[in-house]
Image (cartoon, grey):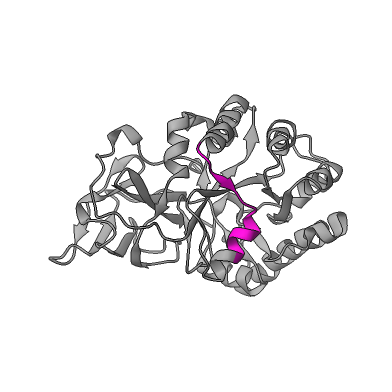
Amino acid sequence: MWKSLCRVLFIFAALPAAVQAAPTAPPSHAVVFIYHRFGDDRYPSTNTGTKQFAAELEWLAANHYEVWPLPRIVEVLQAGKEIPDHVVAITLDDAFQSAYEHAYPLLKARGWPFTVFVSTDSVDEHASDFMTWDELREMAAHSATLANHTADHGHLPFREKGESDLAWADRIRGDIEKAQARLQAELGKDANTQPKLFAYPYGEYSEELVKLVNGLGYIAFGQQAGVLTSPLDPRALPRFPINEHYAAVDDFALRAAALPMPFKSVAPWDPQIHADNPPKLEATLDTESVPAAALHCYENGSEMRIEWQDAAKTRFTLRAAKSLGVGRDRYNCTANVDGRYRWYSHMWLLAPAP
């Protein structure tokens, strides 16, 4: 069974109190939120209530957050320039009709920018749950960036039965290029986003897929929780998934105020699970920013044992208690320092049997 793509893998109430540390200015960073459907309780794992969304926008305004266009955030971080604290971006994946009906009016009323990652085949096929090109053009005229989410929204890292590596690469490249061609044909100059942005369907990626996507000139986004910071890694940038399961504004506020986790290294980077299951993650923590005592890691809601590899408690390993199932899973690490969470999520991906 595929696990819910937006599931948060720990409970805030169970997290320990903040560790006090010497105050330092936060690094240049920005938080990106990902939404899918709105006011559609048929799909709770990808749905956000309309009142919930309105309350989240009101919280951002009341707490003096700035909402920036996603391309602007990417450009500033790529250039190594500073982003002020409390900057966020809003992204809507797939181009669902409910996003046009319920989210867009609220964003338009505030004049806030947002990005729609468009799955173009569903729009072309006039699927009932999806926007039309006219609606997308309307949003593009009111602060929306429209970006590539493939044509058919498939599970990109996986080969079809009997498919060679070369045939797989040709198929995926064709799907991405088809989507970009449709965006440009329908939207003209509004589709010429620079830098070029791409979102992996289901947040699924692999090392091979990343090379293909980056080779086409895209900055790519996943669906694993985390915070954008410099130096910007264009392979699979994090976004915080939002859905109705965690509707409390306090939960949203914790994510909005999150800071990047100061890991100096993480291995392996490739999320694909091959022979080693449960997979082992090795990382090095910058303990000048986050004391070892503040670090807590979770898998499927359960706290994991951190195996420190040195006396200074900077290098550690994580391994789940049992093998991970087919599809997506995550190891999540957080650290509450001075009341703000540092956040890192590592996706794992196990292919179904051929």
**Residue 326 visible (yes or no):** no
Q: Which residues are magenta?
A: 63-75
Is residue 59 one of those drawn in magenta? no
**Residue 287 visible (yes or no):** yes
Q: What residue is at 20 percent from the left and 51 percent from the top?
A: 293
Viewer-closest of 22 and 198 = 22
Viewer-closest of 227 and 181 = 227
Q: What residue is at 18 percent from the left and 65 percent from the top?
A: 309
Residue 224 point in image, percent of width and height: 48, 51
When the figure is inspected, residue 1 is found, relative to residue 189, above or below; the finding is above
- Asked where in the image residue 211 lies, by quadrant, the reply is bottom right
Q: Is residue 180 left or right of residue 298?
A: right
Q: Is residue 92 left or right of residue 284?
A: right
Q: What is the tally of numbered marks visible in this picture?
A: 0
Q: What residue is at 22 percent from the left and 64 percent from the top?
A: 314
- Asked where in the image residue 339 lies, by quadrant, the reply is top left
Residue 14 point in image, percent of width and height: 28, 35
Viewer-closest of 353 and 1 = 1
Is residue 72 one of those drawn in magenta? yes
Residue 263 point in image, percent of width and height: 34, 63
Residue 219 point in image, percent of width and height: 61, 65
For the C terminus, give its image quadrant: bottom right
Viewer-closest of 264 and 87 = 87
When the figure is inspected, residue 51 is found, relative to residue 306, above or below; the finding is above
